Image (cartoon, rainbow, N blue to C red):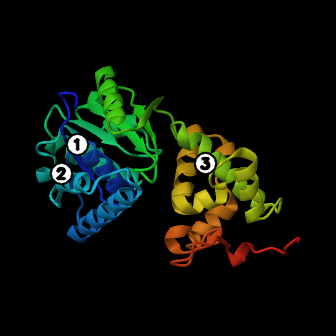
Amino acid sequence: MHNNTINNVTVIGSGTMGNGICHVFAQAGFNVSMMDIRQDALDKAIATIAKNMDRQVQKGSLTEEAKQVSLARIATYTDMGEAVKNADLVVEAATENIDLKLNIFRQLDALAPASCILASNTSSISITKIASVTKRADKVIGMHFMNPVPVMKLVEIINGYATAAEVTSTIYKMAEQLGKVPCVANDYPGFVANRLLLPMINEAIISLQEGVAGVTEIDTIMKLGMAHPMGPLQLADFIGLDVCLSILQVLHSGFGNPKYAPSALLVNMVQAGYLGVKSGEGFYKYTAGSKDLVVSPMFAKKEWN
């Protein structure tokens, strides 16, 4: 059973994170409104959710009936006013761009019911700053889901400067209802996950740039030596090198500390359009349908064996 306060959840954005967030809320029994500016993006998101649920059905973690019931809980909207008019909670999962997010929160504050909690899935933008453009700073909070959302257990919950304790408590309990493990952090640049992760990724790129070791070696050392499921360079490709760069820029400007400065190699790769998986090439080269990890020709090195 849900706590009394939250039954209707609106998710703004239907991309990778947005559709994953809709998926877990619908599966946990919430009524979900998914909003995006384009209907074709919404249709694609529904197809993705159905495909991901089919995978759960094949694995035996979801019944076909539960899948159908969950999908029926999701409604799609291109009009924000319509999407949020009955919302108890809104989760914003738009692109990681501060001006865009502030604009969305201004609109949400004007359109959503007064009692509605406004959450952002931002991975690095200040919740306090986002809250400052609303008249309900006490009801603004960060809910940072991890990708892929249906699989990853963590939800990083971020308190803004003015977030009310009962709002934090509501969101904490709700994350548990989603089958997630909530961890609460305060509003400092990068929160915890990215404050620790991005300097590691950046250091891996600097090590590559300085010729300390090759792509495969760096990733293998972290996978086998530190038990990371994916090496830092492969993970950077998966996140998107442009996203890595923008989070490092948030850390660098937020703390004013040179240790967070993005490496020259990362900056160059992003400028040249090598963004990782989404552009087809980053530290590795990605070919549709291929499962093999192939180092980008840019970084191919002589073999030792």
Would you call the spot at circle 3 few (<14 residues within 10 Å), some (14-19), or many (20 or more)?
A: many
Q: Which residue, given by chain and number where applicable, does mark 2 sit on?
A: 73
Q: Earlier in the sequence, mark 3 or mark 2?
A: 2
Q: Residue at x 26, y 55 (%)?
A: 67
Q: Earlier in the sequence, mark 3 or mark 1?
A: 1
Which residue is at the far top? Answer: 165
Q: Closer to the observer: label 3 or label 2? A: 2
Mark linked to residue 185:
none
Please name the residue that numbered disc 1 is placed on.
29
Query: Which corner quadrant holds the N terminus?
Result: top left
Q: Is residue 40 left or right of residue 265?
A: left
User: Depth-wise, is mark 3 or mark 1 nearer the camera?
Assistant: 1
Q: Which residue is mark 3?
A: 198
- Determine crowd level at label 1: few under 14, some 14-19, many 20+ residues with C-alpha closer than 10 A: some
**Distance between the Cα atoms at labels 3 and 2?**
36 Å
Question: Mark 2 is on which residue type?
Answer: Arg
Disc nearer the start of the sequence (2/1): 1
Task: Report x, y in % for residue 231.
Answer: 66, 55
